[in-house]
Image (cartoon, helix red, strand yellow):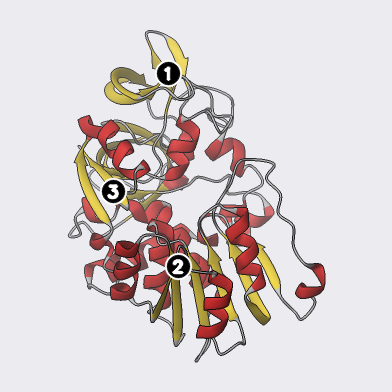
Amino acid sequence: MSTTTRAAVVESGGAPFTLTDVELDEPGPGETLVRMVAAGLCHTDLGAASGGLPFPLPGVLGHEGAGVVEAVGPSVTGIAPGDHVVLSFTSCGGCHNCRDGHPAYCAAWLPLNLIGGRRADGTSTISRDGAPLGGHFFGQSSFAERALVDERSLVKVDPDVQLESIAPLGCGVQTGVGAVWNVLKPKAGSSLVVLGAGAVGLSAVMAAALTPATTVIAVDKVAERLALARSLGATHTVNADEGDIAEAILALTGGQGADGVVESTASVAVLRKGADVLAPRGTLVVVGAPPFGTEVALDVNALLPGKKVVGLTLGDSETRTSIPALVQLVRDGRLPLHRLITHYPFADIEQAVRDMSAGKTIKPVLTF
């Protein structure tokens, strides 16, 4: 039996989010029905809504959901009605990278999460007046009061933690944290630079503050975000509007350059600056995603002293291990995620989009 629910539908590229009734399929094998409590708004949602990604529209987006399980389909194990869950990306579970503990690099990641809009078998999870809509976004399409969610997108979490406080863990936060913990892995005395103090960049700053790195430099153009970065653990800040950031970073690292750099702005000019300030054997982690096909020029000879440029998806996280750990850190006050969040009623999704686009809020979280 299908479920009727209210969802934020984007009719075409550049159109607003419009609340309307849609129908969800009955949970099939490996699927669950989740009552949404909160959902974070991410730049990837805005990119798809703008038509910048080949996601089928009209459709339902949303990929930082948190809610309560209402029903489970056949073959679902370990999850039961009443469980509190954070929703993240989905994966096939059977390819080499999934079996090797790296589901963010699943062989079917793009169609299953970002651009397919359908289940792996090509069927639709969401319809309206009998016509299929784009759905299955990150295995969830959580901009709705209820969502049909892949079991592999679900992570069971501590029911004592408010879901409104942890919804962003499913994408932006674990991406920034994973860049530091899973890729850079700072050693004692390391220097680390975070380019961009948005939700992902500030998550990287918070993660760096929980490592032995002794120099953590945040770079942004917005003074208020730089002040927030310092309060979250940055030891130094650089305002990109007040001079050459490469010169400033080199000065702060004694001319040696940074052992690790997290690039979260999606600007190729900033990415190049990040490569230029790497110390020998340093690593630049590319997190920000510009439009498909974007290229950047690098000085090849400058890379020869063991420098690395690494791309990253979703923090290279194994979600059922990483997300419960992050929930515990939030609960214990060691990951002060609440300082990034502004809550909006679901009906105000368009206001949340405007505020995020204008830089007025770092991480909007919709509440249901």
Image quadrant containing the C terminus: top left
Labels in figure, total? 3
Neighbours of disc 3 within 10 Å: few (<14), some (14-19), many (20+): few
Query: Identity of the amino acid at label 3?
Result: Lys
> Could you say which is closer to the camera, residue 284 or residue 236?
236
Image quadrant containing the N terminus: top left
* Residue 321 visible, this orientation: no
Choose top left, top right, bottom left or bottom right for residue 351: top left
Counting from the top left corner in percent of width and height, residue 343 is at 20, 46
Distance from Cα at disc 2 to Cα at disc 1: 41 Å
Query: Identity of the amino acid at label 1?
Result: Glu
Against 20, is 324 above or below?
below
The circle on residue 360 is 3
Tell me the mark number nearer the camera, choosing from 3 and 1: 3
Q: Is disc 2 placed on a helix, strand or loop?
A: loop
> Could you say which is closer to the camera, residue 316 or residue 342?
342
Neighbours of disc 2 within 10 Å: few (<14), some (14-19), many (20+): few
Q: Which residue is mark 2?
A: 242
Against 136, is 257 above or below?
below
Q: Is disc 1 placed on a helix, strand or loop?
A: loop
Q: Which residue is mark 1?
A: 11
Cβ atoms at labels 3 and 1 below 8 Å apart: no
